[in-house]
Amino acid sequence: MNRRSFIINSAVTASSLALGLKPATAQAYPQRPVRTIVPYAAGGASDTLGRLLAARIDKDLGQPLVIDNRAGGASMIGTQAVAMAAPDGYTIGFVDSAFMVNPGLFGAKVPYDTRKDFEPISLLAVTPLVLAVHPSSPASNVRELVALAKSKPGVMTFGSGGIGSGLHLAGEQLRQVAGLDVIHVPYRGGAPAVLDLIAGKIDYAFSTIPSILQQIQGGQAKPLGLTTGRIAQLPGVPALAEVGFPEVDAVLEIGLVAPARTPSEIVAKLNQIAVNAVTTEPLRQRMIDIGFVPIGSTPQAFRERIDREIDKWIRLIAAGNIKPDQ
């Protein structure tokens, strides 16, 4: 390049930057596959949605999303890997409700700052939780279940997927707001809790829709209420807010985040593609069919939700004196 060409090119570049135009390298993102960390083993809700999303958005992104399962540490191992990754858009991560719960549950043991070490991309979807009892239970609605529990303090049991899980915290919300004296029975996952519920070994449980829908449809479990509004799969089941318990609002949340300081134009592009994927067919209907409620929020709305949820769970966990299972 001669000196005249260098001067002209430099001037063009400077003018473009002054006008707010992005260099070609930023405009061309991505140039290689994007690693997407799921902080759980294959087969869970986050992994299922991650693989559905990856299959849907490859074309729009122009590069494949490569799922990287990093299980362990109550989701913190995989999430820490996202926080420590280069903020260049080539590593992003799925997060779920544990992302917002862990600051209250583990405190200073969380190896990253949940509020500061990530750029939220989008809240992709939520999964309602359903409060269910054994078909033989005399309770036919939530108020009757509460009255039954109050008539037998320290006797009735509720199961969950483990201490600090969303299923546990939904039960804790109900316990605190209704003033119940009940026994929490933690399991290693939601599926074993459902099995003991239909076997009559526990009195009630909160469950995700995918984990218990078949049992409800088969008459092995009786649904009483939902932590969100009514859903198509269970049209006759009211929201807990409808029957006087709006504070019981725990859901399974699944979203996408990037490392802090990821360029805003990359976050915006990932947001646009992800939102389009979860709000249009065929992925939208597929998500509904397996128990998700598609959301597709803006980055700012997701950030505000993260802050609200962290504060909510810190208060609830402290009030319940809940300690993580060691």
Image: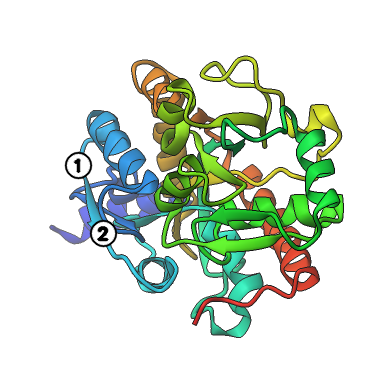
Q: How many marks can you see?
A: 2
Q: CA distance from mark 1 to mark 2?
A: 16 Å
**Residue 212, image x and y in percent?**
46, 35
**Residue 182, image x and y in percent?**
73, 59
Any part of residue 16 in sight: no
Q: Which quadrant holds residue 244?
A: top right
Dot placed on the residue nearer the N-terminal end, 1 or 2: 1
Q: Eyeballing the image, is 45 above or below 104?
A: above
Disc 1 is placed on an element classified as loop
**Residue 137, image x and y in percent?**
65, 35
At a point 54% along the width and 45% down the height, the residue shown is 252
Q: Amino acid at mark 2?
A: Asn
Q: Eyeballing the image, is 303 above or below 277?
A: below
Q: Is 13 left, or right, of 200 in this rendering?
A: left
Residue 69 got which mark?
2
Q: Which residue is mark 1?
A: 64
Disc 2 is placed on an element classified as strand
Q: In this view, which residue lies farthest toward the left?
A: 1
At a point 67% along the width and 52% down the height, the residue shown is 171
Q: Give the crowd class for mark 1: few <14, some 14-19, many >=20 residues within 10 Å.
A: some
Q: Is 140 left, or right, of 190 in this rendering?
A: right
Q: Nearer the viewer, residue 13 or 194?
A: 194
Q: Nearer the viewer, residue 40 or 223?
A: 223
Q: Give the crowd class for mark 2: few <14, some 14-19, many >=20 residues within 10 Å.
A: some
Q: Amino acid at mark 1?
A: Pro
